[in-house]
């Protein structure tokens, strides 16, 4: 089984997303991609039972930390800010749905955040990227453009300072 995200646009052009549990070609269940729908889906279907240990079922899906200090999920190239060229809303939604459980586990295992670092667990409380109201197709396009621009700037930097492909001047 795996969970897939389906994005459409309504009559006003606003993104509308659903999450579907599929087993092979069979649709098992479909819910709205909102807080209640995600909580229902991710509490009902055990993460360990999902393909490849990832909610989306993709061998390529990974996580990172974005410049916003929260988690990011996706595949493709990771830019310098921690965002993926192919964002994965399914895995981000699973992360969001487990927020209370994750925070409780952190506090149980490590105690409350220390006084000198009260924001230590902030990453665990933040929504994961891509956010539920974002169009992942558009995000992928924007992220790909950003990665290409980063590459261009590094090439220009290396050329300006006479740095060769081997990293030597």
Image: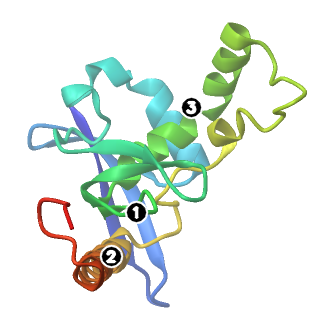
User: Residues at badges 1 and 2 in contact (C-beta under 8 Å)?
Assistant: yes
Query: Closer to the N terminus: mark 1 or mark 3?
Result: 1
Q: Residue at x 36, y 79 (%)?
A: 142
Mark 3 vs mark 2: give the one in front: 2
From the top left corner, tell me how far across and down residue 81 is, in percent: 46, 62
Q: Position of residue 74 (x, y in %)?
A: 32, 52
Please name the residue that numbered disc 2 is placed on: 150
Label 3 or label 2, whichever comes before in sequence order: 3
Q: Of callouts 1 and 2, which one flags the residue occurring earlier in the amino acid sequence?
A: 1
Name the residue furthest right. 115
Q: Quadrant of the N terminus?
A: top left
- Badge 1 marks a residue whose secondary structure is loop
Q: Residue at left 64%, top 41%? A: 123
Is residue 107 visible in the rendered image? The answer is yes
Q: Which residue is mark 3?
A: 98
Find the distance from the CA under tag 1 to the CA under tag 3. Answer: 27 Å
Q: Which residue is mark 1?
A: 80
The residue depicted at 47 percent of the width and 55 percent of the height is 32
Could you tell me how far apart the alpha carbons at marks 1 and 2 are, in whole angstroms?
8 Å
Picture coordinates of residue 61, whole percent (x, y) = 26, 44
Question: Residue 73, position in %: x, y?
Answer: 38, 49
Q: State how far apart marks 3 and 2 are (Cα).
A: 33 Å
For label 2, the SS is helix
**Dot 3 crowding, Cα within 10 Å, few <14, some 14–19, many 20+:** some
29 lies above or below 46: below
Relative side of 12 to 104, left or right: left
């Amino acid at each position: 089984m795996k969970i897939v995200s389906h994005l459409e646009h309504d009559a006003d052009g606003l993104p509308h997303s659903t999450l579907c549990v599929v087993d092979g070609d069979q649709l098992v269940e479909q819910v709205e991609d909102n807080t209640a729908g995600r909580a229902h889906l991710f509490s009902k279907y055990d993460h360990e039972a999902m393909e490849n240990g990832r909610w989306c079922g993709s061998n390529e899906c990974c996580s990172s930390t974005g410049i916003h200090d929260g988690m990011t999920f996706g595949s493709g190239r990771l830019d310098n800010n921690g965002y993926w060229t192919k964002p994965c809303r399914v895995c981000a939604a699973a992360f969001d749905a487990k927020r209370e459980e994750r925070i409780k586990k952190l506090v149980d295992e490590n105690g409350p955040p220390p006084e000198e670092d009260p924001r230590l667990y902030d990453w665990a409380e933040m929504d994961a990227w891509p956010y539920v109201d974002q169009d992942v197709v558009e995000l992928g396009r924007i992220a790909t453009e950003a990665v290409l621009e980063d590459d261009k700037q590094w090439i220009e930097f290396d050329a300006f300072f006479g740095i060769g492909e081997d990293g030597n001047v």
